[in-house]
Image (cartoon, rainbow, N blue to C red):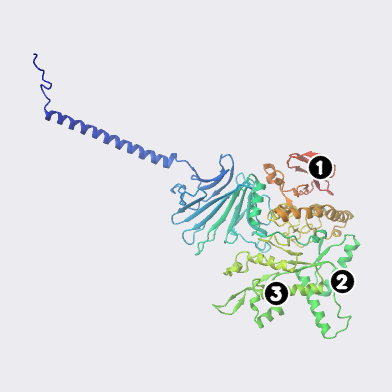
Amino acid sequence: MPHARNRNPSPIPEVTWDTGLKEMNETWKGAIACLGVAVFFVMTIGIIYWQVVDQPNKNWILRGTFSGLIWERRTHSLVIQTLMEDNTYVEIDVGNVGNPDIEDPFVRNLCWLNKTEFCYTWDSVAEVTISLEVNEETETECYSMNWRPVHCHVELKDCFSMTNVSWYGGASVRGQTWPINDQNVTTQPFVVSDLMGNPSGFGSALERYFLGSTGVAVLVSPDIPLQLGLDSRHQFCLQSLPSMERVPLQYTVCVARNVKAAHQEAVQQLSQHSRELPDMNALWLPFWKLLANMDSGPKVERELRTFSNRLRRHQLGEGVISLNEHSTTLLSDMDHDYLNSRKRGMSKRLTRDLPLVKLLNISITLSPFLGVDTTQFHTSLMDGTEAFWLSLPSAPRGQLIPVMSQWRGKFCVKLNITNPGAASWFLDRVGSLQAHLGMEYVVLEGGEGNLFEEQSLRPPQALGGDKYISLLADLATRIGDSTIVTAGTRSSHKPLFVRMTPLQSDWSPMGLKGIIPSLLHHTLLGYNFLIPDAVGGSLSGDLVTDEELFIRWLEIIAFLPVISFHTPPWVCGEDRVLNLTRAYIVKHQRDVVPLIEKYAEEWQMTGNPIYRPMWWLSPSDPVTFTIDDQFLIGDEVLVAPVVEKGAVQRDIYLPDGGFQWQDSRSAQVFDGGTFLHDHPVPLEEVAVFLRRS
């Protein structure tokens, strides 16, 4: 039997094996530790590199169905683009909030999982809430921005880039442009001011609404104090007012498929009331200013008779003779003297009524100002109705002291339009004048400006900003639907006429070239029923002797709602001017007024402007975005006046919309999208094209 083999003849000593394993563990531990340190170091460097160098500069904040809001870290701006990033609607610089060099990425949504709202806070500066609302029916998306300062005296400022965007809207300015990109306005309160006293301010028609050619609309909250500045060709900026009350900056940005769709969406958001038409009979009558310098009521009456006879002699038809405030006062005082004399039993010959004045079609001019040297003002101080005038208490619960101001070179007080008694007194005054003078039209001047803020006084809450103008518009509607106001804000739906800003008697953007940009600006904001400045311009008050300027001005005004004259045509001394004046008055009544009445009904239903820019028919054509010397009446008539001195030809662009245009003079038909170079326009004519399907 073989000897059995030993399975473990020489076992390894236990001590020798343990020593080797420990040596191997220590070596691997050291290597792994070094590797871990190296990996940690590389990861740290990578994170730092990613944060500083390679981190994406764009972060999507909110996404809609076709657009999205992006945070551009490098430029410190919010950008609204299409989801494909092939089109930028608007870029908003918010660089005054935080520091773009050290600020954390603007990606942490503090609204958690809410996909239609974004919240963020910059420590010690401001917090912002952005919400997205998608309207699938109108194919628009609106981003509501709400900035709130964290501490007092923080100024919030958002600037909208003008790069590759033509902007419209906002406020009228002296030397209106279309678009507003070429305007340069220092940052100032965004309220209507009196351009006569503040030529660099905002005047006439003002709304907190801006429209961009990329299909973007900006609607600013109406009740928050705001400043606006325009840096020509670069940007316009909305800025809050620093105060102890931590005033927010709130606005909504809506985007749509094109500029027309964006405007139509904005109109629906702006329209809180039904739109009412003013007295359309005013469109048929030219307005003639009575310019004679008179110092008594009888002289005013005599001049009215002379002027009326002259209009008839020159066969200029029926019209409205406009009296300024001074002449209105003289006639009013004359009537007052007549009433007193009747009570004293004076003879009939010396106590004439004003039968001629009553037979004439006149307009009078009133303002909310009252001279401090008048009997009415002293009576109000005596009978305790000093609250009829804008006042401040002399001390807490003290006696009211009327705030003094100047109007037309005289020291005056201004009607406290928030006082029901004062409003009733003013309406009674208008009713008395109506009974004695028989006038049909009333012009209300002097609503512009804020009397308190101009004198560094804190206004009552009901009269902050430009609320006085809105209240004056309410008062004007109580007078009647043929009332004319000189400024409008948040009142485009009211049945009123708005008188455009006076212009210089020249060919500059302050004169004739400013008519069409101002027309397009007013109607974009909803103020369609305009009384443009008088033929030849009225800012200087002098009569116009430049025959060519008079004719070219007349040709433009003939296509606007109301024709107004400051200089009578017989002043130019030639039959040609008189004949052209008659012809264009007839053309206005025969061709233009029916068109306005037709599209006035459309405006009432939809809010679409009566007078339209070229992009209305071709909203994706960039050529149309900057045309400022042509306009449309509705969708069917294109008017291209001459606005250059000495020119008898001009370039004309016919927008493309799948239709043709027919020259009303030659009957020649052109395709849409055609550029007519040096199209002949003789002095006596204006280029008009009719749309053909």
Give the residue displayed 68% in from the left and 44% down from the top.
Answer: 619
Q: Quadrant of residue 485?
A: bottom right
Percent from the top left, x then y, of residue 398?
56, 79
How far apart are labels 2 and 1 at the CA level?
A: 48 Å
The residue labelled by disc 1 is: 662
The local crowd at label 2, few if under 14, some if 14 to 19, many if 20 or more residues have their Cα within 10 Å, is few
The label nearer to you, 1 versus 3, is 3
Query: Is residue 455 among what the camera can see?
Result: no
> Which of these two is toward me, 128 or 335?
128
Residue 332 placement, left or right of 248: right
> Which of these two is toward me, 148 or 373?
148
N-term-proximal mark, 1 vs 3 = 3
The local crowd at label 3, few if under 14, some if 14 to 19, many if 20 or more residues have their Cα within 10 Å, is few
What label sits on residue 424 in the rendered view? 3
N-term-proximal mark, 2 vs 1 = 2
> Which of these two is toward me, 607 or 612?
607
Amino acid type, residue under disc 3 in the picture: Ser
The residue labelled by disc 2 is: 356
The local crowd at label 1, few if under 14, some if 14 to 19, many if 20 or more residues have their Cα within 10 Å, is some
Amino acid type, residue under disc 2 in the picture: Leu
Q: Secondary structure at mark 2?
A: helix
The label nearer to you, 2 versus 1, is 1
